[in-house]
Image (spheres, rainbow, N blue to C red):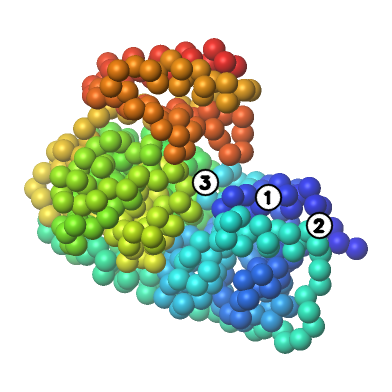
Amino acid sequence: MSTISPGNVNAVFKAYDVRGVVPDQLDEDLARATGQAYVRVLGVTSMVIGYDMRPSSPGLAGAFADGATSAGADVTMIGLASTDQLYFASGHLGLPGAMFTASHNPAQYNGIKMCRAHAQPVGLESGLAEIRDLVLQEAPAPSGRTGSISSHDVLHAYAAHLLSLAPVSGRRLKVVVDAGNGMAGHTAPAVFERLADQVDLVPMYFELDGTFPHHEANPIEAANLVDLQQRVLDERADIGLAFDGDADRCFLVDERGQAVSPSTLTALIAARELAKEPGSTIIHNLITSRAVPEIVAERGGTPVRTRVGHSYIKATMAETDAIFGGEHSGHFYFRDFWRADSGMLAALHALAALAETDQPLSSLLADYERYPMSGEINSEVTDQAAVLAALEATYGGREGVEVDHLDGLSVVSDDWAFNVRASNTEPLLRLNAEGKDVSTMNEIRDEVLAVIRSGK
């Protein structure tokens, strides 16, 4: 008799991936059934599988492989990998893939990110709902051929490919890297050993440990950057790099120990890509700073604004043939990397730009960081629609103010802007605000928060 709970299936299948607590919600039986359904729904005949450093990952990946082979697919195991290393394998080998990771989530979680060949995403609207429904049916795989399982190490090919896209040359740099005990501890050595003549590497928390003994591998939270900021100052380093658990996101710390906004890094990479391919399209989501579309336009590119979420970014990149896309959450997407996101490739762009100049990082980035931003502020709200309506009533009629509903509520004036949008999974409203200066940003942030929190 199956041990798979329909409630667990519905709980762990999210908009873009599978994710839940192990083993209470996600166990090897569910992983095996998902592997079988993945092959049947997508018509897969061969695929690649990678997994992160969490204690549950090898077992879950092995169970998924068992399910996939039982449905007739041949499986290539690439072993320990970052998510962008799995995307590389999918693109490089031309195969669909599955990555076992819960990204920045705490140790008790795990999950599965699935893609088609060449790293094309699989979400609820592109196959994931059908996979979920087949798992719920508990339909046995049709009898027939059983696939094979083999191993293939792609780590060094991955490192070489990234450096071919963003070669680093110029002055020597001292670089502190905080892997957060996540998968950058696996990929960074392979990348940086090729930069030994260019970079003095100071590693932090490179030991692969899915219990995250030092801090959560979630650098978007300021508390998780504190160790890196101090180490950059102590080492008098040129730059600090922080990665999340599966290393598909990257955050920067400058030589003063100050965190760099992901919007600023988006603008820097956009400028570099436009210098390489003038007139190209650049994608940015609607909570990135307005500096991003300004800089893209100034550099002769075409900025295109999207909703928050990788499926929207990747779809719009495909529609527009955009060369690059950035999200304020620290995800950076590259056309030359199969439109997939890579924290390490974003980091190499930052190193390459810094090595080409004699300026410190803070000076290099000054033109890209034009407007103070609040960061994302979450508020628990019961009636989200009522609060959004109240905000629109408060601000929508003001002279010189533009309102749109691409994703939640965006309100823009000459001096400030904000977006408020609902969480997909929790009763939260998320506020991002910016202003022409710090006092303007603080004022609009506090005004909007007062309206939001009066609606609790």
Please say if the residues under marks 2 and 3 sit with CB atoms less than 8 Å apart: no
Rounded to the nearest angstrom, the CA distance separating label 3 from label 1 is 16 Å
Residue 157 vs residue 273: left or right? right
Mark in the foreground, 2 or 3: 2
Q: Note whether 370 is above or below 247 in the view shown.
A: above
Q: Residue at x 57, y 66 (%)?
A: 98
Q: Quadrant of the N terminus?
A: bottom right
| Amino acid marked by disc 1 | Val
Q: Note whether 254 is above or below 29 in the view shown.
A: above
Percent x, y of residue 49: 57, 70
- Front residue of this view, candidates 15 and 51: 15
Q: Residues within 10 Å of mark 3 (few under 14, many from 20)?
A: many
Percent x, y of residue 256: 23, 34
Mark 2 or mark 3: name the one nearer the start of the chain: 2
Q: Secondary structure at mark 2?
A: loop
Disc 1 target residue: 12
Q: Is residue 303 visible?
A: yes
Q: Secondary structure at mark 1?
A: helix
Q: Residue furthest right?
A: 1
Q: How many marks?
A: 3
- Checking the image for residue 104, the label placed there is 3
| Amino acid marked by disc 3 | His
Percent x, y of residue 90: 47, 71
Disc 2 target residue: 4
Q: Residues within 10 Å of mark 1 (few under 14, many from 20)?
A: many
